[in-house]
């Protein structure tokens, strides 16, 4: 089959493939089957993937070449996979066999160039999509969906669970429970007395001869952190799936409460578990902390695995098209800014009038038309109501744009200048900034590039240069080196002539390699192994400077990397240590925690 012009056909139907996805190299038809060779372009790294997504996508492209499915006048797109197995990793080339299995579905067998199996799919179901729908989707017309919560419709003839057991999300390790016996027995409780079981100390099981529960309830406490809540929930879910006692098939109903961050994380976890184990897990989110077990049991409805209770009304999630009415709408006149009502949800974001943007300028101020704003993790925390202490009064702290007006005393800038810098209320059409906090944008830079620079590079420069005094030849460790400040710090330290070491999660090591670090100078930020790794790499000398963003035992391990003394610069906010204690415990180590704003405008 000629495939040289293959991708022109899908493009006419509204399917545009970028260069990485144009992997079809050759194809053949034989006895109702299609065979093909697909490959990744040169330079595309398949490491880190079970099967590179672009390569898998290319393996599906030949489906339309042999009449394997009925295209019905439109494009056929993958809908669901069944029976997927990965036999080998790292493939950059595949030999593919596609066979019809009926009902607009195919099976796939994928091997490498030597014929060794790479992956297989028992059934891939496809569904037709019209060219009109694809074209509409490509320009954003009616292509997005949102989740609407609608009142639940009572179902006649449904029966609530007769017996309910409550399991606590206990602090002790649920993995230690032997689910093959009943060493911690408790009988299932009739719903009329279910509240008596609320304080069960640990996951328990129905005893022999007792009536097995039809429903198991686990309430997520409000006082848990995100990590602890998720850890406890996943341990309980795994325990439930391994259970072989009577009533083990009864669904586990997890109860959460509103916009609490830990509870939101648990809901995401449970929804994933529901997808993997249909019918085994239910989810109730309620604004009533005192809801008795019998009331919870009465809310269980056939076919609904996620329900919400608000003001006594039972609601269920339904997909709805996201229309223009869902967009953030700017005010009709004048400047606007993005702000939040601080309710703990991104739904609270809104575009509000910004009268301060047009107020008369004071000495030293400039008015800027914003072209691009940098999004900082701080902004995410503020928008979600998770920022520690008193939340900052605005969103956005860095931007690039054009000077519209200068105030008294400003002589180094003029209207029309392109500038970047620390800009308050940066998510706005225009705003007012301190002229000392901005500089001109280099001519070759885009506004987007310029807006990404101020906070991360200023933080890195302050920590390494102003506070640590890094010099050529120093050994510098940058923790979280693949993060925003981390990548800036690696570049600054290398610019200064330092020998740079960095940690990052393994999936991000490629970013550190791109910055010029080799394997001997990279370690994981998820393991304490970096201590021994870097001590060995420096023949025991360790570091001269550490720029830290980790906490807990990772701080202690990092301090061990300063056996000759040195400067420990803390830019995190979650584990601040006492400098005098550090100096007493680690000879010659100067400890300094800092926040960029301490530098002052000058």
Image (tube, rainbow, N blue to C red):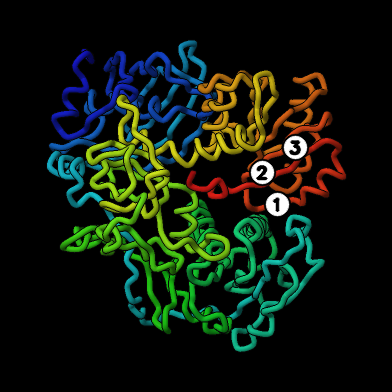
Would you name the residue on which mark 1 appears? 576
Q: Secondary structure at mark 1?
A: loop
Task: Answer above or below: position of 465 versus 1.
Answer: below
Q: Secondary structure at mark 2?
A: strand
Q: Residues within 10 Å of mark 2 (few under 14, many from 20)?
A: many
Identify the residue shown where x is 80% and y is 23%: 541
Q: Confirm or deny contact between disc 1 and disc 2 (CB under 8 A).
A: yes
- Asked whether the viewer can see residue 580, the reply is yes
Disc 3 from disc 1: Cα separation: 14 Å
User: Of the residues tagged 3 and 1, which is closer to the observer?
Assistant: 1
Identify the residue shown where x is 60% and y is 79%: 163
Between 588 and 173, which is closer to the camera in this rendering?
588
Disc 1 from disc 2: Cα separation: 8 Å
Identify the residue shown where x is 39% and y is 41%: 438
Sequence order check: which comes first, mark 2 or mark 3? 3
Q: Secondary structure at mark 3?
A: helix
Residue 373's x, y, as percent? 35, 45
Residue that lies at the very extreme toward the front in this rendered image: 409
User: Of the residues tagged 2 and 3, which is closer to the observer?
Assistant: 2
Would you name the residue on which mark 2 appears? 570
Identify the residue shown where x is 70% and y is 51%: 576
Q: Quadrant of residue 395?
A: bottom left
Would you name the residue on which mark 3 appears? 558
The image quadrant where one finds the N terminus is top left
Task: Answer above or below: position of 588 versus 600.
Answer: above
Q: Quadrant of residue 329?
A: bottom left
- Asked whether the viewer can see residue 218, the reply is no
Residue 600's x, y, as percent? 52, 48
Residue 73 - label: none
């Amino acid at each position: 089959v000629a495939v040289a012009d293959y991708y022109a056909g899908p493009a006419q139907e509204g399917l545009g493939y970028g260069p990485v996805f144009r992997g079809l190299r050759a194809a053949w038809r034989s006895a109702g089957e299609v065979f093909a060779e697909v490959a990744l372009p040169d330079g595309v790294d398949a490491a880190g993937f079970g099967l590179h997504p672009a390569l898998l996508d290319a393996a599906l492209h030949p489906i339309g070449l042999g009449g394997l499915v009925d295209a019905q006048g439109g494009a056929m797109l993958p809908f669901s996979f069944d029976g997927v197995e990965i036999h080998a990793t790292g493939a950059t080339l595949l030999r593919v066999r596609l066979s019809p299995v009926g009902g607009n579905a195919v099976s796939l067998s994928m091997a490498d160039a030597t014929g060794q199996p790479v992956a297989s799919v028992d059934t891939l179901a496809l569904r037709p999509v019209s060219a009109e729908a694809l074209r509409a989707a490509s320009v954003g017309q009616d292509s997005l969906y949102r989740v609407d919560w609608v009142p639940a419709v009572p179902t006649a003839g449904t029966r609530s669970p007769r017996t309910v057991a409550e399991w606590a999300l206990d602090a002790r390790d649920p993995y230690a429970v032997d689910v093959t016996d009943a060493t911690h027995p408790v009988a299932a409780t009739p719903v009329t007395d279910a509240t008596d079981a609320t304080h069960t100390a640990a996951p328990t099981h129905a005893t022999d001869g007792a009536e097995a529960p039809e429903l198991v309830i686990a309430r997520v406490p409000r006082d848990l952190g995100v990590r602890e809540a998720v850890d406890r929930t996943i341990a309980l879910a795994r325990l439930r799936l391994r259970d072989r006692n009577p009533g083990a098939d009864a669904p586990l109903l997890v109860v959460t409460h509103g916009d609490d961050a830990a509870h939101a994380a648990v809901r995401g976890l449970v929804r994933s578990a529901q997808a993997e184990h249909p019918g085994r897990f239910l989810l109730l989110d309620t604004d009533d902390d005192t809801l008795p077990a019998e009331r919870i049991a009465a809310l269980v409805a056939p076919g609904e695995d996620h329900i919400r209770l608000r003001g006594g009304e039972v609601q269920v999630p339904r997909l709805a098209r996201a229309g223009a009415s869902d967009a953030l709408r700017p005010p009709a006149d004048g400047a606007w800014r993005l702000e939040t009502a601080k309710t703990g949800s991104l739904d609270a974001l809104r575009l509000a009038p910004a009268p301060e943007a047009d107020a008369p300028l004071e000495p030293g101020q400039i008015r800027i038309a914003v072209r691009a704003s940098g999004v900082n993790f701080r902004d995410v925390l503020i928008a979600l109501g998770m920022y520690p202490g008193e939340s900052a009064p605005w969103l956005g702290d860095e931007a690039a744009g054009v000077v519209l007006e200068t105030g008294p005393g400003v002589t180094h800038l003029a209207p029309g200048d392109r500038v970047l810098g620390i800009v308050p209320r940066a998510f706005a059409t225009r705003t007012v900034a301190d002229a000392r906090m901005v500089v001109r944008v280099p001519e070759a830079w885009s506004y987007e590039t310029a807006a990404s620079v101020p906070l991360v590079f200023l933080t890195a420069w302050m920590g390494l240069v102003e506070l640590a005094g890094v010099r050529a030849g120093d050994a510098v460790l940058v923790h979280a080196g693949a993060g925003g400040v981390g990548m800036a710090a690696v570049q600054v330290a290398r610019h200064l002539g330092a020998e740079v070491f960095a940690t990052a999660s393994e999936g991000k090591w490629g970013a550190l390699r791109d910055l010029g670090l080799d394997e001997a100078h990279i370690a994981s930020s998820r393991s304490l192994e970096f201590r021994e790794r870097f001590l060995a790499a420096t023949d025991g000398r360790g570091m001269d400077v550490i720029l830290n963003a980790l906490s807990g035992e990772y701080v202690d391990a990092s301090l061990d990397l300063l056996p000759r003394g040195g400067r420990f610069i803390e830019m995190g906010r979650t584990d601040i240590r006492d400098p005098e204690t550090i100096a007493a415990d680690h000879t010659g180590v100067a400890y300094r925690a800092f926040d960029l704003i301490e530098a002052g405008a000058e």
